[in-house]
Image (cartoon, rainbow, N blue to C red):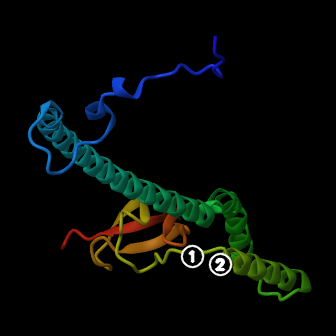
Amino acid sequence: MSRTNGKSEVDPQELDATHELPASENAEEDPATIDAVPRASTESGELQKLRVERDTLIDRLARLQAEFENARKRTAREQQDFREYAVADAVKALLPTLDSFERALQTGSEERSEFRSGVELIYKQFQDALQKLGLRAIPANGELFDPHLHEAIEMVDTADAPDHQILEELQRGYKLKDRLLRPSMVKVARNPKH
């Protein structure tokens, strides 16, 4: 008995050369090359399917990237708006205090006391601080009534003023930057001749 290193001995004549070696380019039609033609057409069909799928995925990717970019821009714009108008509630809460200052300063005290001068100074500082935040008073007296900016409290019949002109401002209105914070409360002229 001969020892083999776990390998079986194969007779070289038993090997079939057509199955072991690739077909040459000049080979005549044999069973191996006949099978290659249908295989090439199926590979071409699969290649076409893969190209269509690739194009679809690239298009989908481009759309998703555009959608993501739009969402990012929208979020940035919303954050900017939030930053600009986050102070709106705080400023709105301070408006009654501003109104009280204005009423206190409108009283007919002709005497220029140090106390009154101090209150006027505080009022001016308060106004300046609110203006830095973007608060602007809405002009009313003598203006034409604008329902987007003014709230009509009373209609007054008069021939002395044109129709829809504001005669008196009862409470000042304010805008914070370009957003209406509080409309002006006004008396509006109603001229029956117009």
> Residue shown at 25%/33% (left/top)?
18
Measured as percent of width and height from the top left, residue 72 is found at 49, 58
Q: Nearer the viewer, residue 123 or 11?
A: 11
Measured as percent of width and height from the top left, residue 102 is found at 69, 73
Q: Residue furthest top?
A: 1
Q: Earlier in the sequence, mark 2 or mark 1?
A: 2
Q: Quadrant of residue 80?
A: bottom right
User: Residue under circle 2?
Assistant: 131
Q: Residue furthest right?
A: 114
For the residues bearing labels 2 and 1, Cβ distance under 8 angstroms: yes
Instruction: State the quadrant of the C terminus.
Output: bottom left
Q: Decide if residue 129 is on the left or right side of residue 171.
A: right
Q: Disc 2 versus disc 1: distance between alpha carbons?
A: 6 Å
Measured as percent of width and height from the top left, residue 149 is found at 43, 66
Q: Is residue 38 visible?
A: yes
Q: Nearer the viewer, residue 4 or 68?
A: 4
Instruction: State the quadrant of the N terminus.
Output: top right
Measured as percent of width and height from the top left, residue 142 is found at 41, 80
Q: Residues within 10 Å of mark 1 (few under 14, many from 20)?
A: some
Q: Quadrant of residue 124?
A: bottom right
Q: Residues within 10 Å of mark 2 (few under 14, many from 20)?
A: some
User: Residue under circle 1?
Assistant: 136
Q: Secondary structure at mark 1?
A: strand
Q: Nearer the viewer, residue 27 or 2?
A: 2
Residue type marked 1: Arg
> Residue shown at 69%/57% (left/top)?
93
Q: Residue furthest left?
A: 29
> Residue shown at 66%/17% (left/top)?
3
| Above or below for 16 versus 87 | above
Q: Quadrant of residue 15?
A: top left
